[in-house]
Image (tube, rainbow, N blue to C red):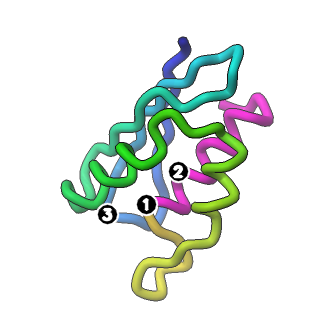
Amino acid sequence: MKTYSYVTKGTCSREILITIEEDENIISAVKFVGGCNGNTQGIGALVAGMNIDDAISRLSGIDCNGKGTSCPDQLAKALTQIKSGIA
C-alpha cells in the first residue's frame, strides 16, 4: 500500500490523505483534513474499496456552491494525479 497527500484548492478542506493498494488501483482509505467533518467522512467511506477510475468518474466535476470545485472534485483531481504519476 502507498499513501499520498494532496493539498486541496478552493475548498474548506486543506488536504486529502489517500491510501491506495498500489497493484490493484483500489482506494483503501481517504481522510480529509478540514472541511465538513460528516461529509468528508462520508466521501471517504463511500470510496473505500473502490477502483480509482470509478471514483474519478463519479466525483469529477461536482461543484460546491459555485466554487467551481468541491471536496469530491478535489479527490478526483488527486486521484487523477496519482494515476498519471504526478503525485
The tag earlier along the polypeptide, 3 or 2, is: 3
Amino acid on which disc 3 is placed: Cys
At horizontal 41% and vertical 37% (from top left) the residue drawn is 30
Does residue 7 sit above or below 58 in this rendering? above
Quarter of the figure with the N terminus: top right
Q: Main secondary structure of the magenta part?
A: helix
Q: CA distance from mark 2 to mark 1?
A: 6 Å
Residue 68 belongs to the span the image colors magenta: no
Disc 2 crowd rating (10 Å Cα; few below 14, some 14-19, many 20+) is many
Residue type at tag 2 = Leu
Question: Considering the numbered disc 2 on the image, is that residue within a helix, a strand or a loop?
Answer: helix
The answer to whether the residue labelled 1 contacts the one labelled 3, judged by CB atoms less than 8 Å apart, is yes
Q: In 3D space, how far apart are the residues under numbered discs 3 and 2 (Cα atoms)?
A: 13 Å
Could you tell me residue 5's position as x and y percent? 48, 31
**Can you give x and y, in whole percent of width and height, for residue 6 in the image?**
50, 39
Residue underneath mark 2: 75
Q: Which mark is residue 71?
A: 1
> Which one is closest to the eye, mark 3 or mark 2?
2
Indicate left or right for 44 with 34 as reference: right
Picture quadrant where residue 20 is located: top right
Report the front residue among 87 and 20.
20
Say which of marks 1 and 3 sits in front: 1
* Labels 2 & 1 near each other (Cβ < 8 A): yes
Which residue is drawn at the image coordinates 28% and 60% (left, top)?
A: 39
Checking the image for residue 12, the label placed there is 3
> Which span of residues is magenta-colored?
71-87
